[in-house]
């Protein structure tokens, strides 16, 4: 009798590499994705890349990845600079803007589209990838927060898979393999607690942008680093998890876990919990999503050093100290366009904080006032959600003055 376990875990026969389109190649997720692809030659192949405006960096990526055949830059000036930089004749430069992102997401030779575009620009390309039946490796939070029902419906319609790249959602996805939805009782996402986890509450009023950008565990962009200090990042992730795993608001919870080693706790109806553990490096969820359903023959980064002392600590996530968590819960309960308002108001408030125009504690105040000022109507169609997004930004801008 052949060793069944062994034959299950071995790669099944010959296979061609999975071909990847990477939208958002020059950000921190993009950088990690390039490392994962480089660490898995023969398994993953980069064929299309897009970035926002950093043309020199994108040109460098194209040069170091000779498998790339398609590229674009979102901004007009960046696009023009990339065109003038003399791309290889093997590389087709697609249109700038959302149109170009969509055409990359639609390429017949692409198997998996990784969307790591900041903001709402990734939405239409994500929907295009799903409509074309491609795997969507999803890193951009805004897409599910804004348009979750549309994105999930697009995946159901074509049978395409959504593979979460965010570490917590990827962790939940891993824990749910082989379990029926009805067996799921609760999903708890862990939060590092951000830069001010151990600060006394009274000091939070004086927090500067420089303080907020010192994240204890993860190296990320400025917006998400501030979001992890306010726990708005966890709030957005709870909203995403609700949508992605079809949960009721009361089935979604957060807990502070300073070490960022356990990424989720999934509780089942029998009371048992499964957790997913790995070092706090984005290469783990990225390689899982890109190689799924297979496991890589090796990891991109070193695994947990279990021969050393690992301390795993959990503390309650206090909604009084982290009002963005309370607002996220209320947002999930309100449903409809409330998550879109929460997201837009938070973006406006964080930008104002980073520009020195809003105190740290003003961030939740702006979000709360914007949510109160706008009705949370049900979601009718995609264009209505995008209109609410724009309106929320305008209203949040007005709240800045008084917060
Ligand atoms: Mg996360």
Image (cartoon, helix red, strand yellow):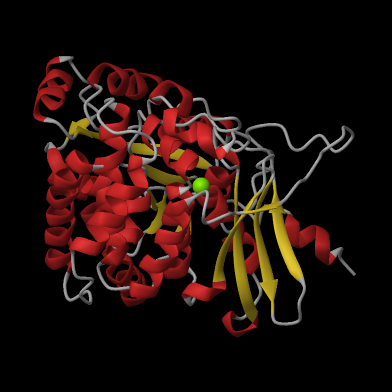
Kindly identify the residue that appears in the image at 44 percent across and 65 percent down: 329
**Of 273 and 27, which appears nearest the observer?**
273
Q: What is the quadrant of the N terminus in the image?
A: bottom right
**Of 230 and 97, which appears nearest the observer?**
230
Residue 160 image position (x, y, % from top left): 39, 67
The picture quadrant where one finds residue 24 is: top left
| Left or right relative to 358: residue 328 | right
Please, which residue is most extreme toward the front here? 202
Kindly identify the residue that appears in the image at 34 percent across and 60 percent down: 145
| Left or right relative to 234: residue 363 | left
Residue 301 image position (x, y, % from top left): 66, 32
Residue 225 image position (x, y, % from top left): 45, 34
Count of marks, rendered view: 0
Q: What is the quadrant of the C terminus in the image?
A: top left
Q: Look at the picture and state if 161 lies above or below 164.
A: below
Residue 219 image position (x, y, % from top left): 52, 29
Kindly identify the residue that appears in the image at 16 percent across and 44 percent down: 397
| Left or right relative to 32: residue 118 | left
Q: Look at the picture and state if 131 lies above or below 169.
A: below
The picture quadrant where one finds residue 392 is: bottom left
Kindly identify the residue that appears in the image at 43 percent across and 28 percent down: 206
In this orientation, does residue 216 appear?
A: yes
The picture quadrant where one finds residue 68 is: top left
Q: Look at the picture and state if 344 lies above or below 219.
A: below
**Of 36 and 165, which appears nearest the observer?**
165
In this orientation, does residue 162 appear?
A: no
């Amino acid at each position: 009798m052949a060793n069944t376990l062994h034959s299950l875990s071995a790669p099944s026969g010959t296979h061609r590499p999975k071909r990847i389109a990477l939208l958002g190649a020059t950000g921190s997720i993009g950088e990690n994705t390039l490392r994962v692809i480089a660490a898995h030659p023969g398994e993953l192949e980069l064929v299309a890349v897009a970035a926002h405006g950093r043309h020199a960096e994108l040109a460098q990526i194209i040069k170091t990845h000779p498998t790339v055949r398609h590229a674009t830059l979102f901004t007009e000036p960046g696009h023009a600079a990339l065109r003038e930089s003399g791309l290889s004749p093997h590389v087709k430069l697609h249109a700038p803007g959302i149109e170009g992102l969509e055409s990359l997401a639609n390429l017949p030779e692409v198997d998996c589209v990784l969307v790591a575009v900041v903001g709402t620009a990734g939405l239409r390309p994500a929907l295009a990838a799903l409509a074309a039946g491609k795997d969507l490796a999803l890193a951009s939070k805004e897409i599910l927060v804004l348009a979750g029902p549309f994105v999930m419906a697009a995946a159901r319609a074509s049978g395409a898979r959504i593979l979460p790249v965010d570490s917590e959602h990827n962790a939940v996805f891993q824990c749910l393999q082989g379990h029926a939805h009805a067996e799921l009782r609760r999903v708890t996402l862990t939060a590092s607690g951000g830069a001010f986890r151990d600060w006394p509450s009274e000091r939070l009023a004086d927090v500067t942008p420089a303080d907020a950008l010192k994240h204890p565990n993860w190296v990320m962009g400025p917006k998400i680093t501030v979001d992890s200090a306010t726990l708005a990042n966890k709030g957005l992730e709870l909203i995403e998890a609700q949508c992605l795993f079809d949960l009721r608001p009361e089935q979604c919870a957060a807990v502070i876990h300073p070490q960022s080693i356990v990424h989720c706790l999934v509780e089942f109806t029998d009371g048992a919990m499964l957790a997913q553990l790995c070092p706090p490096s984005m290469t783990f969820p990225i390689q899982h999503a890109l190689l799924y359903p297979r496991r890589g023959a090796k990891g991109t980064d070193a695994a947990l050093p279990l021969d050393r002392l690992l301390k795993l600590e959990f503390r309650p996530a206090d909604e009084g100290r982290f009002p963005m968590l309370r607002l996220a819960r209320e947002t999930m309960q309100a449903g409809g366009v409330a998550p879109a308002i929460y997201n837009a108001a938070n973006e406006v408030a964080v930008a104002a904080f980073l520009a020195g125009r809003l105190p740290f504690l003003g961030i939740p105040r702006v979000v709360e006032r914007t949510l109160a000022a706008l009705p949370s109507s049900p979601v009718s169609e995609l264009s209505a959600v995008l209109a609410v997004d724009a309106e929320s930004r305008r209203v949040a801008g007005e709240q800045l003055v008084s917060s």
